[in-house]
Amino acid sequence: MKNKILNNRINSTMEMGAFLFFVLFALIGCRTKDDHPTVSTEKAVVKVNILGNHYDNQESIEKKSTAGIPATEMSRIQRQEVAFNGEYTLEAELAPASSYEPIGAKASTKASTETKPLDPGIRYKMAVYKSSGEYVTERDYIRGNEGNTLQLSLDGGQSYTFVAYSVNSATDLPPITFANPANKTLVTSSLEGLSGSADLMYYKKDNMVVSGNTVNYVDITLTHKMSMITTIIDASATGYDVTAITASITPHYPTTAIQLSNGTPAQSGQIGNAPIIFQALNAGTVVSAPLILNAITVTGTLNLASITVGPMTQQNIVALNNVVINPGVKYDLRIRINPKDVFLDHQGQKAARINGVVWMRYDLGAPGSTSNIDPDQDPSIMDLYGNFYQWGRIPAIGTANWPGVSSWSSNIVQPDNAWNSGTEIAPVKTATDPCPSGYRIPTKREAESLISGTTASNIGLWAASQTNYSAAKVLTSIRNKNVKLTLPVGGRVQTHDYGGIYAPLGYEQRGQFAYFHTSYTEGNNIYYLQGSSTGMMVNTPGDNNTMNKFQAFPIRCVAE
């Protein structure tokens, strides 16, 4: 009996213990589920995908308009002119490199920031921070050999900030400096004491969640943080070569630092000059090695300590001053040595050299060019009015007195390079260019140069009429008031769209607007020199309408 009672007590105790264990386990399980969310132990492999590098020229090349009139390159090109000697002037201009696009580049391409591959062998670093800012780790990479770097593994499901940088060097990669090495954070991370000539590039990706048990890629495009300036000296108009030059740009700081949290450089040290190095001379046009400028300034200055062109040596020329130079922008600095503005005979044509460009003094096809009528007299003589040409085509479709239309094209759209197979800077005449030997259609840039190098005035009666041959725009050289171009106000040939067939309707706006073709176009937006009673401009329709390329304007040719 005692054994039976004892066994019953033991069994009861065991049952109670099992019950209590079950309850305790359930309570612990519930508490764990409610109070302590599960933390993934899955590791996330992170690899870099280096997309390339770019200069942030987007802001400087965006096209804006006022009252429907598109802005031109003039709005972002900074120009100045100084005397070189008694026979020549020196014109300098600083512009974002993207202001000089080749013929045929589409507007969408021109308004974007160009990304180029990072050269093989270039070193770059990627640092990793938690979303709360604490430093986690870093990796050094060599472009083309990223697989040789220790694999980066992070906690899956977590958010991180990735910062990458480089100085575009195959040997140099500066370390991160922490303001407090015992408490490393993103806001206390920086690069210190960098050379002012270092080509600093930077990238940041905030709050990227990485996934466990998979490969995560960080797509890196490094952005240049310093200005890069390439200098081009063009003395070809003189007929001589550039044989020696000592030049520099100021201000330039010897050192810089950058906060990794925002990528903003901070210049330091004593202000000095950055020398411009020309590796090849003895040519009519010489190009410098790219210069890294460490400055943010509205007082940029180009100093020519000495320059020798043929037999001429000039010293201590300030070619540019008080120009704006922004960090992260790639610039072209162009210096042209131009003969002074004069009338001349060139390639069998009466011409005027204005702002370094030789212009015919007559409209193309004007009868007065062969009968030696003074082109600057009262333009009421019809023989001073030239022929009309559709954009990109060689035959004239009509004369000033409109006896009829011949050689009109109704539906074949000409390509963007129909009149220039080169670039705005180095134009190349094509077989469809109607200008005589030694001459070609002007570029848009040359048309803008004509405007900037002259003052405009009016003669005659400005009123729209197909019989009005009196109005003209007179462009007088700002360097020599005796040199001028007289542009008859011939209007244009009105065009009509008959379901994709573009037919001529006759003259319009004669006596009201002067139109002259340039070789430049962006798609169907042709650019032309336009004169009105109130001023001169380079204009474009801006609507990308196919009809634009079928319009017919006069032409004023320039020397090749």
Image (cartoon, grey):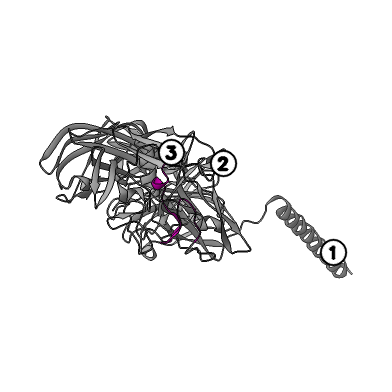
Residue 396 on the magenta span: yes
Residue at mark 1: 12
Of residues 531 and 121, the one drawn nearer to the viewer in this rendering: 531
Residue at mark 3: 472
- Examine the rendered structure and indicate whether residue 388 appears above or below residue 9: above
- Examine the rendered structure and indicate whether residue 10 appears above or below residue 349: below
The three-letter amino acid code for the residue at tag 3 is: Ala
Crowding near pointer 2: few (<14 within 10 Å), some, many (20+)?
Answer: few
Nearer to us: label 3 or label 2: 3
Image position, residue 538 (x, y; %)? 45, 43
1 or 3: tag closer to the N-terminus: 1
Q: Is residue 277 left or right of residue 196?
A: left
Measure the C-alpha gap from mark 1 to mark 3: 120 Å
Cβ–Cβ below 8 Å for labels 1 and 3? no
1 or 2: tag closer to the N-terminus: 1
Of residues 183 and 442, the one drawn nearer to the viewer in this rendering: 442
Does the image show residue 207? yes
* Mark 3 residue element: strand
3 or 2: tag closer to the N-terminus: 2
Q: Is residue 7 left or right of residue 436?
A: right
Which mark is drawn over residue 68? Answer: 2
The three-letter amino acid code for the residue at tag 2 is: Gly
Measure the C-alpha gap from mark 3 to mark 2: 25 Å
Crowding near pointer 3: few (<14 within 10 Å), some, many (20+)?
Answer: many
Measure the C-alpha gap from mark 1 to mark 2: 96 Å
The three-letter amino acid code for the residue at tag 1 is: Ser
